[in-house]
Structures are given as C-alpha cells and as structure tokens.
Image (cartoon, grey):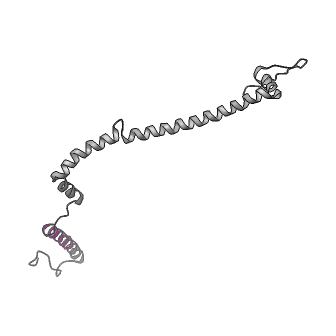
Amino acid sequence: MNHRGFTSFGSGTLLERYDQIRFDSQRIKSYIFNMEEQYYRKEKPKLKTWLTKTLRKKSVLIGLLIGLPLLSFMLFSNKGILQRISLESEKKAAEEKVKLIKIEQQKLLNESKALDNDPKAIERVAREKYGMIKQGETVYKIKRKQE
C-alpha cells in the first residue's frame, strides 16, 4: 500500500491485479461520494420551503382565516356557485320540456281545427279511434303472431 491507502501494481498474478484494481476503483468512488456529501450543500425541496416561509407570515394567515370560510360560503351555500349551476341546468331542462309541450299543443290544435271543418278527418278519427264503420261495411281484423 502506498501513502494514500491504494496498493501498487508491481506484484501478484494478473487476476490478483485485476481484483485489486477493481477494489481500488470502488474505494475511489466511495471516497469521492463521501467528499461530495461533506462539502456540497444538499438541495432542499423548493415548494416545501416556500410554503413554510409563506405560512409564517401573519398577513397570509389572516388572509387564509378570512378567505377560506368566505370561499366555502360562496361555493357551498344555498346562494353559492354550485347551487346556481344546478339551478341553471334544471332551468334548461324545464325550457326543453316546455318547447316539446308547445309542439304537442300545436299538433293538437291543428287536429282540432281539422275535426271542426273537414268531414274526412272526422271519418278517419271515428274509424281509427272508436272503431266505427259505415252501414253495409264489413270489418276484418287480422291477428298478428306474437314474437
């Protein structure tokens, strides 16, 4: 061994020399790693340090104490944003329902006007809805097989 703790390469077989070189390289790597740990600063997580520094300030704490309850009230109360969103979706659904009912009402009004004036419409409704027939007609009903 020399003065630094590493062996010289002068004696031994080739296999012994190889093992000694490998052992020495591992020792060098661990020595360098230990020096880096000793002399370099360790990086601190930036977000954590920023958060702790910010939370230590009184103005931030007061802001959070006032802001969090206010924010939760704005979001979750009866007059909050979430309630408004749900009411708006209910309103849209009700408006769609009103449109469909108005269309159906218009169809019924048209049919009512046709029944007031058109004898053919009256006859069609009497035959389809009430099963009426004219004198001398024979009705044939066809039974369909159930699938």
* Residue extending farthest top: 135
In terms of depth relative to the viewer, which is nearer, 13 or 7? 7
The residue depicted at 19 percent of the width and 48 percent of the height is 62
Residue 139 spot, x, y in % from top left: 85, 20
38 part of magenta stretch: yes
Quadrant where the C terminus is found in the figure: top right
Residue 103 spot, x, y in % from top left: 64, 35
18 part of magenta stretch: no
In terms of depth relative to the viewer, which is nearer, 112 or 50? 112
Residue 102 spot, x, y in % from top left: 62, 34
Residue range highlighted in magenta: 22-43
* Residue 126 figure quarter: top right
Check the image and report above or below for 93 versus 125: below
Check the image and report above or below for 117 versus 40: above
Quadrant where the N terminus is found in the figure: bottom left
The residue depicted at 21 percent of the width and 58 percent of the height is 50
The residue depicted at 18 percent of the width and 54 percent of the height is 52
Asked if residue 122 lies left or right of residue 36, the reply is right
In terms of depth relative to the viewer, which is nearer, 55 or 147? 55
The residue depicted at 22 percent of the width and 49 percent of the height is 63
